[in-house]
Image (spheres, helix red, strand yellow):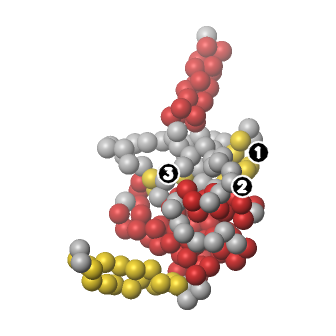
Amino acid sequence: MPTTADPRPLTGEPVSLDLLNTRWNREGVTQDLLTDTEGLAVWLAANGLDFPADDAVLLHVREARDALRSAVDGTLEEAAAGIDAVLAHGRVRVTLTGQGPGEEAEFGDPSWGPAWLAARDYLGLLATAPDRIRRCAHDSCILHFFDTSRNGTRRWCSMAACGNRAKASRHYARTREA
């Protein structure tokens, strides 16, 4: 259980995007939750991932974050090798449960578990609605979100933060011109 609260401005996104959101800007300075195993423990707990917060897991999660950033901010062609490298460390075993068909993730090395789950989650988002994977529209924000709005027009990571700053900036520009 982590000893510190989650300091990130945006949480609760799907695990792949939540991993990307372990880096954010605060007053023009990039913050990184994954600088040590304590920050890793915060991220694991926030996503309900029952894995140890040790150096091996931290290394693999950072690798997955870099691969996901390449995929989301770049092109799938450029990012495919990085994502595939993470996915090579696990697999899905199809099962039959009392409730019907199921899936179980298996890892040759459990320290790859959180990284693999994040990469797998990203594939699920791509299969569901790739056009709903977004980066915040505010120029200084580096956060990502999965747009679950009814009409798919969400632009900001948070209307209270980035959306409000954009509105205030437009208002200031209009009043200054007048």
Q: Mark 2 points at which residue?
A: 32
SS at badge 1 = strand
Residue in the picture at 71% in, 41% down: 26
Alpha carbon of mark 2 to alpha carbon of mark 3: how far?
Answer: 17 Å
Left or right, 138 with respect to 48, comes to: right
SS at badge 3 = loop
Residue in the picture at 70% in, 72% down: 54
Q: What residue type is labelled 3?
A: Gly
Left or right, 4 with respect to 125, comes to: right
SS at badge 2 = strand
Establish if 76 lies above or below 111. above
| Mark 3 crowdedness (10 Å alpha carbons): few <14, some 14-19, many ≥20 | few
Q: Mark 1 points at which residue?
A: 29
**Residues at marks 2 and 3 touching, judged by CB atoms closer than 8 Å:** no
Q: Is residue 19 at all visible to an observer of this figure?
A: no
Tell me the number on the disc at residue 12.
3
- Foreground tag (3 vs 1): 3
Considering only order in the chain, which callout, 3 or 2, is on the residue closer to the N terminus? 3
In which image quadrant can residue 29 be found?
top right
